[in-house]
Amino acid sequence: MRTQVGIVGAGPAGLLLSHLLARQGIDAVVLETRSRDYVEQRVRAGVLEHPTVELLREVGLADRLDREGLPHEGISLRFDGGDHRIDFADLTGRGIVVYGQQEVVKDLIAARLDAGGDILFEVSDVAVAGLDDDPLITFTDADGRAQELHCAVIAGCDGFHGITRGAFAPEMFERDYPFAWLGILAKAAPTHHELVYASHANGFALYSMRSPEVTRLYLQVPPDTDASTWSDGQVWDELGTRLAADGFHLNEGPVLEKSVTAMRSVVAEPMRHGRLFLAGDAAHIVPPTGAKGMNLAIADVRVLAEALTGYLRNGDESGIDAYSDTCLRRVWRAEHFSWWMTSMLHTFDTEDAFTRRLQLSQLRYTVSSRAAATSLAENYVGLPHGAL
Ligand code: FAS
Ligand code: PHB
């Protein structure tokens, strides 16, 4: 098999990259280990930042997003029993849209297949070679046949646990956190129209949503928590405690999904090795407190699609030579913001009263100073692509 760009991974990064390249007349083949059903059902991110929504609209991928997505103009920070709204519209003139990552993935897959795009699901034994001058991806296809995909360039969009980052030895910058998030998806109508980030002595909690019928909620738990050790009743009780505030009521309902997500910050530098380009979680991970993970993946592939277009159509190597440095400026901004939100809102060592007072001071300043609130707001809604 031959194509111009071999893309490993059919998550938001790989799928959007194949769509952006097709718009420039550049061929790509996407290889995915999981089934189509699996990737379309996998519950993950929920917040699309402003530049992500604008890009999806620009490239004709936002019809259902504009019909079913939930536009939000702010979030609330809850601490000391009080609610403090950060008004994105007032502070930045922009907002976010709540629309599940799995919906974005469904829209991307449908668009690619409708356009005759190549997405090979349920492949295995994927390996990359010839990264300096003759890129090759070998794999076993869904029918068990050994395949070779010769390409001009390989895009490693295979997430944190993929194989492409391991094909070379990038320098790794990492930070683990002493906690994880237990997340539930519940068939329970949201009772509040915006997200609530709660910093409670028992630990952090996040109130989010997916639709007028489905609520998405998270609890800070110890890092090695097994989701099955939390009964639905225990989850609802702890959410009620941590999210408690005057006039706030939490609708309970059947739990549709329950899982634990590790909290870590990771960056691999550089994001390029010869003809291999990493994008999204394959290159970096952020704790989900800043709602940046999927948005960063989308920002990476916007840069990569433009760079590969210049290279493959006109032989212009300036874009691919600048790719890693260009992406890493936004990556480190998102890493810092996600670390900052995580450090401010989560309970670390409960015996460390000094840290707790620093956190409360930071929270009070953030909600009382227009300058501090604007800093949170402009990072949360997303700095314009190319701003850094
Ligand atoms: P992805 O991981 O989405 O996609 C990589 C794809 O590559 C997957 O489909 C995988 O099956 C495939 N793959 C892996 N190895 C392969 C191989 N060898 N060959 C072929 N294919 C291979 N972000 C938020 O903003 N908010 C959240 O609440 C949030 N929750 C998360 C919960 C979990 C459990 C995880 C793991 C991540 C979460 N994230 C969240 C981050 C998440 O949204 C990522 O940032 C986003 O999926 C990144 O997209 P991709 O880079 O495309 O990687
Ligand atoms: C979600 O709705 O899944 C969500 C929202 C905000 C976050 C993380 C996850 O910071």
Image: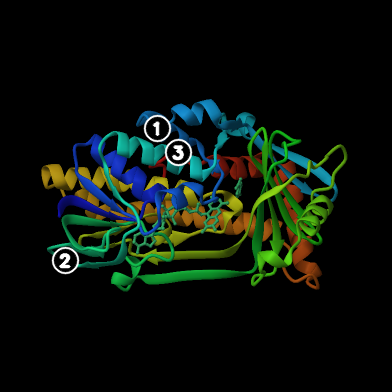
Of residue 325 and residue 13, the one placed in the foreground of this image is 13
Of residue 185 and residue 99, the one placed in the foreground of this image is 185
Residue named by callout 1 = 61
Q: Tag 3 or tag 1, which sits nearer the N-term? A: 3
Q: Which mark is residue 132?
A: 2
* Of labels 1 and 3, the one closer to you: 1
Image location of residue 82, percent across then percent down: 83, 44
Q: Secondary structure at mark 1?
A: loop
Q: Amino acid at mark 1?
A: Leu
Q: Amino acid at mark 3?
A: Thr
Q: Secondary structure at mark 2?
A: loop
Q: Residue furthest front?
A: 143
Please tell me how crowded label 3 is: few (under 14), some (14-19), or many (20+) other residues with Cα within 10 Å: many
Mark 3 CB in 8 Å range of ligand 1? no
Of residue 266 and residue 47, the one placed in the foreground of this image is 47
Q: CA distance from mark 1 to mark 3?
A: 11 Å
Q: CA distance from mark 3 to mark 2?
A: 32 Å
Residue named by callout 3 = 52
